[in-house]
Image (cartoon, grey):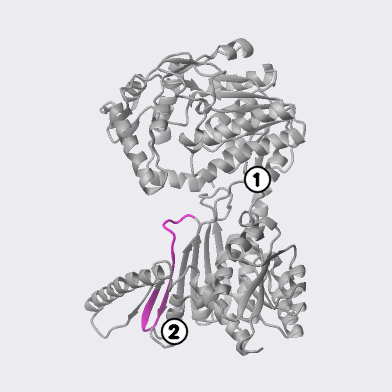
């Protein structure tokens, strides 16, 4: 092609990686972006607007028909081969995101299509063009470490927050995490040690991300010239990306996130001074490289996804000059083969795992949030009374539920509408207890807001006759009245939930979804707002009561504020009564024990039972408000949110009494166990529940899986 010609470039796929391809193409003199297409038109339009891409097309074919010379395939891996072959047949050069294809046969088809069309294909093995990897490869090829014998690679990862909606691709198949990230490790291993001859893989579950079944990967690969050991984790923090190459004459280390490469050669010295000198040399090298590279990054001489930018530039230079492709299709064949082999094993393991759980069932009663405090006790109550119940949970439930013939287990995320719909289908009564109790704003949006929306939609779609929704007293306008206000179900809802934190915001929005559906769409539902629920399996010392710091218990305020407590079995009784006696007309019921107990009284009871040598510290309210004021000022200066504000503090310290006469009158509910007996049972169980150290808890968690 003429040296001054500019290639017309189209992007197929507008996901996360597309913006870096767009940035890279814009830096190439002989290329210009002319269009983008994506299955989600709004996503393509957003990318086009951000990068001044002239046109958004409904399909790749439509874009090619308008005149495109090069296609970047940036879609999910299973579509790569089909799109690449179609683009080649339409006389386009193709740059494909890793992995090139799903299996080696698809790679062969791509190569054949490229040869037939006399067009070029390049694969984005971007780390090969990362400046630090390139430096390491140069040192190894120069003989700096002698004969390389081993390659050790570690990468910790995270996926973008899932806020609900169709399950993202990285959660769908068991092997996708390795298909996504393991490919980098394998092609690097081949670059340092030669072609891979065999692979042995292990995939495990720690559970940091409940939607990601296999989040710990270990792979041993035998290469022509040595052994590669690969570890990929979605749990290790802070995020890491490094590798070590060991040889007969030295060791090379590269940290891609910290931006340094070190080389420790074998020295002709006794062991002790050689080790000391090597350590000092390596440390000094790191101290010199890191600040220099940070400065380069700040000056944009090093950019995010630097290797991708370099590979894209090399790809377009090759098209302009007729040189060989940076990473041709046949070079990627081995990587695709071994990546596919490892990921297929995990795909089969996930299918086997999911087969343990229901995809359909006979139970007419559904409980969401069945592994939480309320849900767990509710399920036990229903099962013990001979009611067949299905439970919807994100993680495998305890063995007592799995082995109970009255319980059907449905696995899924409340944010996933398809999973929720499978669980709701065929039921007549839904107890929607599930909600996010802690985590990021994304977690609350997915689990509480989107989860409730999905439940409501499925209940309406399947004409379920009864929905019992568990709301929260946090939805109430806590600062609407003064000290000792008596709160009924007609009390106003919080008008500024964003000022109260993510939990209140999510629960308020979720309750509104239910109430609006009752009013506008004839949803048959009843809403319960339990107080501060406690029971065996949790500590009574929540932050609302006191915070324990060693032998000290810190109480906010003078400790005379009454707590709206209710024992878990009494809440379950109210829930069951609501299902039996409610009119399902959107009525709201407060569920709080009438017994009055203050922070001081509860902490004293706890100390007598579990911590007899402890001391109590009261933090004056004036100090708390001063701190909140200072944080609000700091928030405005830094333009960032802070965990404490005057409004949030005032809401948390509000003194309110709850009138539960409606529940007594219409449902016939009164506490059966009560606070006194409930506290005895809870605190009696607490030492056994919380006395183990952290290591023991981790060991128990892993053993349970």
* Residue visible at 58% across and 47% down in the picture: 163
**Hey, which quadrant is residue 25 in on the image?**
bottom right
Q: Say which residue label 2 marks.
A: 138
Mark 1 or mark 2: whose residue is earlier in sequence: 2
Q: What segment carries the magenta color? A: 235-253
The tag on residue 169 is none
Secondary structure of the residue carrying tag 1 is loop
Residue 696, image x, y percentages: 41, 44
The picture places residue 109, in percent across and down from the top left corner, at: 74, 77
- Which quadrant of the rendered structure holds the N terminus? bottom right
Q: Residues at badges 1 and 2 in contact (C-beta under 8 Å)?
A: no
Counting the numbered discs, the total is 2
How busy is the neighbourhood of tag 2: few (under 14 within 10 Å), some, or many (20 plus)?
A: few
Query: Disc 1 to disc 2, how far (Cα)?
Result: 47 Å
How many other residues sit within 10 Å of disc 1, few (<14), some (14-19) or many (≥20)? Answer: many
Asked which quadrant contains residue 651, the reply is: top left
Q: Element at badge 2?
A: helix
Q: Which of 383 and 371 is in front in this view?
A: 371
Q: In this view, does 260 lie to the left or right of 118?
A: left
Residue designated by label 1 = 416
Compared to 191, does 667 lie above or below?
above
The quadrant in which residue 190 appears is: bottom right
Could you tell me which residue is drawn at 40 percent across and 19 percent down?
562
- Percent coordinates x, y for residue 63 in the rendering: 73, 69
| Residue found farthest to the top | 665
Residue at image location 62% in from the left, 70% down from the top: 99
> Depth check: 110 or 698 in front?
110
65 horizontally vs 536: left or right: right
Image location (x, y in percent) of residue 186: 55, 72
Image vertical order of residue 161 relative to residue 692, above or below = below
């Amino acid at each position: 092609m003429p040296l001054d010609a500019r290639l017309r470039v189209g992007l197929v796929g507008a996901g996360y990686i597309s913006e870096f391809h767009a940035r890279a193409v814009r830096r190439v003199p002989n290329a210009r972006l002319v269009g983008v297409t994506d299955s989600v038109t709004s996503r393509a339009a957003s990318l086009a607007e951000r990068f001044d891409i002239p046109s958004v097309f409904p399909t790749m074919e439509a874009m090619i028909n308008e005149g495109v010379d090069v296609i970047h395939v940036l879609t999910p891996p299973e579509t790569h081969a089909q799109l690449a072959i179609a683009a080649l047949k339409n006389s386009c050069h193709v740059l494909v995101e890793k992995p090139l294809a799903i299996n080696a046969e698809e790679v062969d088809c791509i190569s054949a299509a490229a040869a037939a069309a006399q067009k070029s294909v390049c694969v984005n093995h971007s780390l090969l063009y990362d400046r630090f990897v390139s430096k390491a490869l140069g040192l190894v090829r120069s003989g700096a470490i002698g004969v390389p014998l081993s390659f050790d690679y570690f990468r910790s990862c995270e996926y973008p927050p899932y806020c609900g909606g169709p399950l993202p691709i990285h959660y769908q198949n068991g092997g996708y995490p390795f298909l996504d990230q393991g490919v980098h490790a394998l092609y690097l291993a081949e670059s340092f040690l030669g072609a891979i001859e065999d692979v042995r893989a292990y995939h495990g579950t720690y559970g940091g991300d409940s939607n990601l079944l296999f989040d710990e990967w270990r792979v041993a690969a035998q290469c022509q010239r040595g052994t590669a050991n690969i570890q990929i984790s979605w749990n290790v923090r802070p995020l890491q990306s490094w590798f070590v190459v060991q040889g007969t004459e030295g060791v090379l280390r590269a940290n891609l996130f910290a931006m340094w490469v070190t080389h420790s050669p074998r020295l002709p010295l006794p062991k002790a001074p050689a080790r000391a000198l090597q350590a000092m040399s390596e440390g000094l090298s790191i101290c010199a490289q890191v600040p220099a590279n940070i400065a380069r990054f700040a000056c944009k001489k090093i950019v995010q996804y630097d290797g991708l930018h370099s590979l894209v530039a090399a790809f377009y230079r090759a098209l302009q000059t007729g040189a060989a492709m940076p990473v041709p299709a046949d070079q990627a064949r081995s990587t695709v083969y071994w990546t596919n082999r490892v990921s297929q094993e995990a795909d089969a393991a996930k299918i086997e795992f999911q087969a343990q759980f229901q995809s359909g069932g006979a139970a007419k009663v559904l409980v969401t949030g069945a592994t939480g405090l309320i849900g767990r006790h509710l399920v036990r109550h229903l099962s013990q009374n001979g009611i067949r119940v299905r439970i919807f949970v994100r993680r495998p439930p305890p063995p007592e539920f799995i082995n109970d013939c009255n319980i059907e287990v449905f696995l899924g995320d409340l944010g996933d509408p398809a999973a929720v719909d499978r669980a709701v289908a065929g039921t007549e009564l839904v107890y929607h207890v599930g909600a996010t109790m802690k985590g990021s704003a994304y977690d609350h949006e997915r689990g509480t807001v989107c989860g409730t929306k999905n439940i409501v939609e499925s209940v309406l779609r399947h004409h379920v006759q009864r929905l019992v929704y568990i709301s929260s007293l946090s939805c109430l306008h806590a600062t609407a009245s003064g000290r000792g206000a008596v709160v009924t179900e007609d009390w106003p809802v919080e008008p500024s939930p964003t000022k109260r934190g993510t939990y209140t915001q999510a629960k308020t929005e979720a309750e509104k979804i239910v109430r609006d559906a009752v009013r506008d769409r004839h949803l048959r539902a009843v809403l319960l707002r339990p107080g501060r629920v406690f029971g065996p399996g949790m500590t009574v010392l929540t932050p609302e009561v006191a915070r324990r710091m060693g032998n000290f218990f810190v109480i906010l305020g003078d400790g005379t504020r009454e707590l709206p407590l209710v024992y878990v079995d009494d809440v379950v009784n109210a829930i069951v009564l609501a299902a039996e006696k409610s009119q399902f007309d959107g009525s709201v019921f407060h569920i709080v024990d009438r017994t009055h107990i203050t922070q001081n009284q509860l902490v004293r009871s706890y100390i007598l039972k579990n911590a007899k040598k402890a001391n109590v510290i009261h933090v004056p309210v004036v100090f708390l408000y001063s701190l909140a004021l200072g944080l609000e000022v700091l928030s405005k200066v830094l333009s960032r949110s802070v965990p404490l504000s005057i409004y949030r503090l005032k809401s948390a310290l509000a003194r309110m009494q709850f009138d539960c006469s409606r529940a007594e009158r219409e449902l016939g509910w009164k506490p059966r166990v009560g606070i006194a007996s409930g506290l005895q049972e809870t605190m009696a169980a607490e030492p056994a529940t919380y006395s183990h150290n952290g290591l023991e808890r981790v060991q128990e968690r892993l053993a349970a899986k």
